[in-house]
Image (spheres, coloured by chain):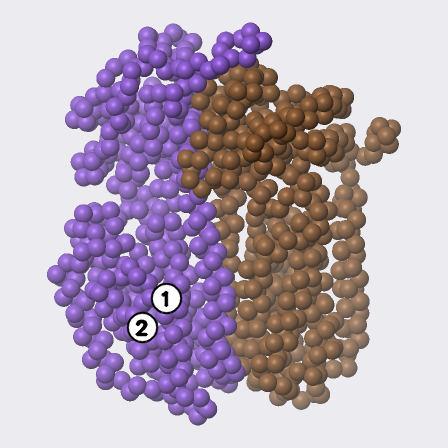
Amino acid sequence: MTGVMARRPEPDRLVYWQAVDSGRLLLMAAAAMLVTASFASAAVILTSTTVYWDAALAFGGLIAFGELLRLALPGGREAAPIAMVGALSYALLLLPVHGEPHSRPHGQVVLPPELVIAVCAVGMMVGALPHIAAGRPAGVTGMCGRLVAVAGVAFIFRLVVYGFVHTRSWELQAGVMAVLIFFGWLVDTVVAALIRADDVGARFAVALVDEIRLQWQLGLAVGASVIITVFSVDAIGLPILIAFVGPLLVTQVAFRRYAGIRATYLQTVRSLARVTEVAGYVEAGHSRRVSRLAVAMGRGLGMAEPELLALEYAALMHDIGQLSLRDPIPGGATVLVSPADQERIAELGADVIRQAGVLDEVADLVRCQAWPARGHDPAPPLGSRIIRAANAFDDMVGSSTDRDRSIAAIDRMRLDPVRYDVDVVTVLSEVASRRVASRL
Amino acid sequence: MTSGQLGISRQLAGTPRAGRITPAAWAYIGVVVLAAAVLVARTPVLGRTHAAGSNPWTDLVVLQALFLVCDSASAPLTFRQTRWSPSWAATLAAAVLLGPAAAAFVGAMSLLSLRREPQLGERLFNGAMHALSGLAAGSAYLAINRSVGFPHYQHFGRTLLAFAVAAVVHVAANHGMIWVINRLNGASAPPRADGSESSLALLLSSDLGYASLGLVIASLWMIMDWFAAVIVLVPLFVARWAMAQFVEEQRAYTATMNALCQAVETKDYYTRGHGDRVSRGSVMIASKIGMNAARTEAIRFAGMLHDVGKLGVPTQVLQKTGPLTEDEFAAIQLHPMRGLEIVREIGFLFEALNGIMHHHERIDGRGYPMGLAGHEIPEFARVIAVADAFDSMTSTRSYREAKSIDLAVAELRRGAGSQFDPVLVEAFIAAVAQQGWELPGPTGAPADLAMVTVQDHDDPTAPLQVVLP
């Protein structure tokens, strides 16, 4: 085992493609094939028919603009709602548009799905260029997910249902579009959940529910905006897009502020949790290591994102009660003091957190962290059992990545099923072995 | 401050005259209402010229309903500061579809606002003001576009121009009238320096951003009729949801910060509430010298956290009653750097970090940790230094009793120019004279601070001691 590990190249020497996991690679390959095929096919189709270049330019521009203004969502996610509005509107465009193509002399104007995909791909690449130039990640995975979703919608709408709906009433058209937009959104969300489950080691079902919970409001706004765009372009023509960019931007600003304050919040708690380290109550890096470990364990035990956030806060602040101690415990290791004192420190910490008035759930997790996993009435919540195990592990192992030391610590915890939950310790040993492997 | 709305009670909250309307303002409200009534009466009600199948009166009612829904859905734009209301997209849609008088009728719905807080005077003013703004915007649109009704693709360029002018006229009329009544109503109130000017840019851009929705509604109306009003509500409500979440998170954030800061202070019995009071004092100075909202918010946090580095100083040193040895003093001098170490990774303003790091510098250059002098010292640090010293002097310490406010003011004046920035000292003294100063509560006997808890029988080290809460 160690021999195999030793022969692996070091992580920072990995070529980009080697560092990409299989799920991502599959998605990228699918998107690349789609784009190549679309370009080829579009080139063939377009030599024989008239292209509605104005729309291609306008929507391609909107997509590029939307990719430029990507939105960071809680949990390190990235969305591009304006690009999605542009791409889906282009896929669902009703032809002919007022005042535009039907006055052209040559033949019937077409909008084949291959053209939609080609325009989307170009728009996305153009929009991603400034990100690359600024040294930010290009966000290839997100773009591929969006492209696949849009391609699905474009093929179904343009090839299957367009002939049926394009002469019908607007109610029917809007209904069909709503169903297709929902389908596209679902594809995008499922892809995002798959990638995320792969990335962070979460269960797919949990990741999917998390994605849906986090994305449905934005999805709703995008869906309504697509229908508004398609029909207002149908009524007025492409210039109406100028009027609709403003409302889209304001909606995006609202989301950005929301995501921004959440990030600042977490960052602040992370920093302030370090006061116990600076004050010499605990070892340097303890609270952050415990929180990282606890979140990984919570994920392994199938906790959803809101619970994980509470767990992360609680793990970061689990030692805050020590601030009320006159002098630091030797080594800061709460695992070494008596159970009664451990409970007292936990109570003190929970009191501090409860003062905030908005983190009662977190306070409960901190309060119950010193309770034994078995035989205590009421039983401590899962989060508290996780924090207890993670804290004990870190008190014993610290920042060391020594494999034997970590195994010894876990074995010791296994021998004490009253204090440490058996399932939690099992997950801990998985997480710890992954941690050791990743450091090798 | 409200977006396109007058909210007197919120506007002047915190002043003794909160919620009152002065006689001058009442007279002004009368003039606005009268002007609105006369001008609207002189304009033909429905200027619709195209032959649309639907009933223009139904359209008017739907737009009025849209206005009311948007109005009641207005969300606070930032914590404690501004409200945001996209309602006048409905006014502008009426101006495009039905003409100036209809726009005025839609705007007048502000009178019936579903929000509870506006009083009668505000409702009258808001209704009349929105009616007048709608009338002005509608007239501008009609003058340039030369017709009302569904926008047409053949001369959409002209329509776009007319609409942009109408939106600007609406914003100007709206904010102009609000500005006048605020002047009339709040002339005696202290200048509001809590940063209305910095949020104004945000407010104006979001106003204009949503204004163009009016044109989109008018265009969609051609195909979807009244359903256009329904479908635009979807993204609007999602945006409102995000705004509300933002405000909620911000509130939670502030509360958590306060709780953590208090936790930090439990260690030093004498300085309980010190961070909070210094934070308030710093904000008082900041308002007095006219800092903008973002910086004021940053200095609030900086004031609260300025002593967080004291945690790195052993408790015995902090609570020592006798004179300090050189080593002990050196340990105390390190606390600004320790504080910086803790808060460095928080993504708030760089300035706040400077304030924390340099709050013990002196104008004459004899402070610590860097020995900066005069205006080399960052402004935040100079502000915090004044509030910090004042609160320290007016609080009881282990080695002395608290000074009176007058005595502390005299001390500040004495230190102005050598220890403190004279301008900031005067600003602080003026602010204290105006708004008062909350003294710390009485402190108990320091003799028996520690409580010994039960100790693990096989642990040989000293018993755990808990500082009494």
Question: In this view of the protein, which residue sits in the foreground, A212 or B357?
Answer: A212
The color chain B is rendered in? purple
Say left or right for A103 vs B426.
right
**Residue B361 at least partly seen:** no
Q: CA distance from mark 2 to mark 1?
A: 9 Å
Quadrant into which the N terminus of chain A falls: top right
CB contact under 8 Å: marks 2 and 1: yes
Quadrant into which the C terminus of chain A falls: top right
Q: With respect to residue B218, does A423 lie above or below? A: above
Question: In this view of the protein, which residue sits in the foreground, A433 or A46?
Answer: A433
**Residue A347 at least partly seen:** yes
Mark carried by residue B331: none
Q: How far across and how far down the image is residue B256, in percent?
A: 44, 38
Q: Which residue ends up furthest to the left in the rendered image?
A: B23
The color chain A is rendered in? brown
Question: In this view of the protein, which residue sits in the foreground, A217 or A8?
Answer: A217
Q: Chain of mark 2?
A: B
Q: Residues within 10 Å of mark 2 (few under 14, many from 20)?
A: many
Q: Which residue is mark 2?
A: B109
Say left or right for B194 vs A76.
left
Q: How far across and how far down the image is residue B155, in percent?
A: 47, 84
- Taking the spot 37% from the left edge, 71% from the top edge, the residue there is B67
Circle nearer the N terminus (2, 1): 1
Q: Which residue is mark 1?
A: B71
